[in-house]
Amino acid sequence: MKVVLAYSGGLDTSIMIKWLKDNYDCEVVCYAADVGQEEELDGLKEKALKTGASKIYIEDLKEEFAKDFLFPMLKSGAVYEGDYLLGTSVARPLIAKRQIEIAKKEKADAVAHGATGKGNDQVRFELTFKALAPNLKIIAPWREWELKGREEEIVYAKKNNIPIPVSKKKPYSSDRNLWHISYEGGILEDPWFEPKEEMFLLTSSPEKAPNKPEYIEIGFEKGEPRVVSGKSMKPVELIQYLNKAGGRHGIGRADIVENRLVGMKSRGVYETPGGTILYKAHQALESITLDRDTAHYKELVAKRYAELVYYGQWFTPLKEALDAFIDSTQKYVSGTVRLKLYKGNCTVVGRQSKYSLFDYNLATFERESVYNQKDAEGFINLFGLPIKVNAKNRGGK
């Protein structure tokens, strides 16, 4: 039997190699994905092989992550429960997709992951597995083994001479990628507790941000960002640039209590500086390039799209159909947005497009000849007719 394990080199997956071999009498192939977490990958190969893996794949997926996952989500406008820009959620289907491709290449019998039985990630990994390889066996050690927590894992590692990361234990857990950093658990489980400033890695505090605002311009083509302040950038470079710019000015922090898919509420703190800027700019450009009915209906689609991403339903017929609708709406979402970054705020201060539906002659309050204000009386009479009838027939005055 051969198993492909999603491997990070942390405590959980370090002991999983040994556990899988003992409990499934199998060969373990490890796989580590670089989605921009900027964790040290040096030495990972040697560690995996030393702890029992027969092989390890270490792959850079950042470009695919930005182009095929982050930008489609940006175009959709998806935000989960009003604040969460879905940074962890959207990375999981990409990681799982590549894991399946490696499993097929290796002719593996199963795939395994290190997600716990209490969180959302187990669902995201396994729904992708089921969508792309429905007959492949899935192994989730956290739902099977007898180990009850970190301390028992450490005892297991020492007993089996498994080298584990030696670091000062953080009073919370974090997950980082190209799009964001998330923090949860530990001291953050108290929703009344205010995070300490030293926790944040991507953003300065708004109080300590520069006293002078920074202006940037973002150019879009069919809903996708291509240019920042006159410079063409590839997706990864563009996001990294905006992360630094937003981070300098304390932009992109969110502290929320969200509803997990598995049924419980969970407190999460997020830093998404570049994503916050991009969402703001994209929305501003849509405000002048989308007609009212399309814009309003797209808001409904965005909410459903966010649920699909959060629930791990990336590779589904509905997601594919919504992508087709969204791409259709982005046909004329091309132009430039100017933003002011200052003290935690990202403010749109200008937007322009050759496809703009904004007509000065219609919108102006000055003397004009295009719009006949007398026409409004008939429109209001017809639009308000149901209200008038209801009032007259039911005692209104």
Image (cartoon, rainbow, N blue to C red):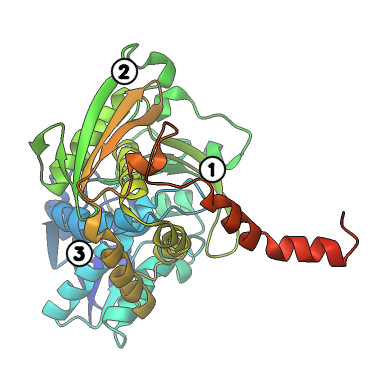
Q: Which residue is mark 2?
A: 213
Q: Amino acid at mark 1?
A: Ile
Select label 1 or label 3 by which is in front: 1
Taking the view exactly as shown, the residue that stands out farthest to the bottom is 135
Find the distance from the CA under tag 1 to the CA under tag 3.
Answer: 34 Å
Looking at the image, is 217 positioned above or below residue 137? above
- Which sits in the foreground, 49 or 217? 217
Find the distance from the CA under tag 2 to the CA under tag 1.
Answer: 27 Å
Q: Position of residue 175 (x, y in %)?
A: 35, 46
Task: Give the quadrant of the C terminus.
Answer: bottom right
Of labels 2 and 1, earlier in sequence is 2
Select label 2 or label 3 by which is in front: 2
Task: Tell me how many marks there are.
Answer: 3
Q: Position of residue 240 (x, y in %)?
A: 20, 38
The residue sitting at 44% across, 23% down in the picture is: 197
Looking at the image, is 288 positioned above or below residue 69? above
**Residue 30 has which mark?**
3
**Residue 256 has which mark?**
1
Q: Is residue 30 left or right of residue 303?
A: left
The residue sitting at 15% across, 48% down in the picture is: 235
Residue 111 visible here: yes
Around disc 3, counting alpha carbons within 10 Å, would you say few (fewer than 14), some (14 to 19), or many (20 or more)?
Answer: many
Around disc 1, counting alpha carbons within 10 Å, would you say few (fewer than 14), some (14 to 19), or many (20 or more)?
Answer: some
Find the distance from the CA under tag 2 to the CA under tag 3.
Answer: 46 Å
